[in-house]
Amino acid sequence: MLCKHYTAGMDLWGTCKFYTYQHMKHTNETRQLSIHALGGCRKWERNYDIDPFGVTWAEFREPQ
């Protein structure tokens, strides 16, 4: 959910802007990979536009 490649979808499921795959079952088109917001990945990169703690938790934020 905090990865810069994550795009929010329904509930905690979304898509990855980094990985794609060839969907051969119905349309044979290239799609973005479905991912869970709490999952992990080797290509994970923090999205600094999202502040998971908000201003009330500023003392716990890592320095930028």
Image (tube, rainbow, N blue to C red):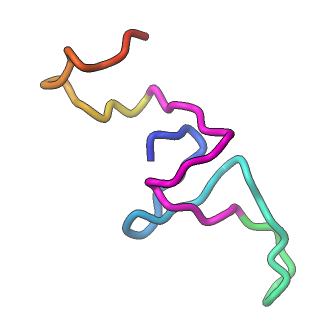
Res 50 quadrant in image = top left
Is 64 a magenta residue? no
Look at 45% across and 26% down and name the residue there.
48
* Relative horizontal placement of residue 33, taking residue 53 as reference (left or right): right
The outermost residue toward the left is 56
Residue sitting nearer the eye, 36 or 15: 36
Q: Which residues are magenta?
A: 32-48
Main SS category, magenta section: loop
Residue 60 place in picture, x, y as percent: 24, 19
Residue at the image position 71 percent from the left and 47 percent from the top: 18
Image point 47% across, 65% down: which residue? Answer: 13
Q: Is residue 25 left or right of residue 41?
A: right
Query: Vertical placement of 5 versus 11: above or below?
Result: above
- Residue 33: % across, % down: 68, 63
47 is within the stretch colored magenta: yes
- Specify the farthest residue to the bottom: 26
Count of marks placed on residues = 0
Quadrant containing the C terminus in the rendered view: top left
* Viewer-closest of 42 and 29: 42
Residue at screen point 80% across, 88% down: 25
Q: Is residue 16 above or below residue 46?
A: below
Please identify the quarter of the rendering in which residue 54 is found: top left
Looking at the picture, does residue 38 appear above or below residue 60? Answer: below
Q: Position of residue 58 (x, y in %)?
A: 21, 18
Q: Position of residue 22 (x, y in %)?
A: 84, 71
Front residue of this view, candidates 10 and 61: 61
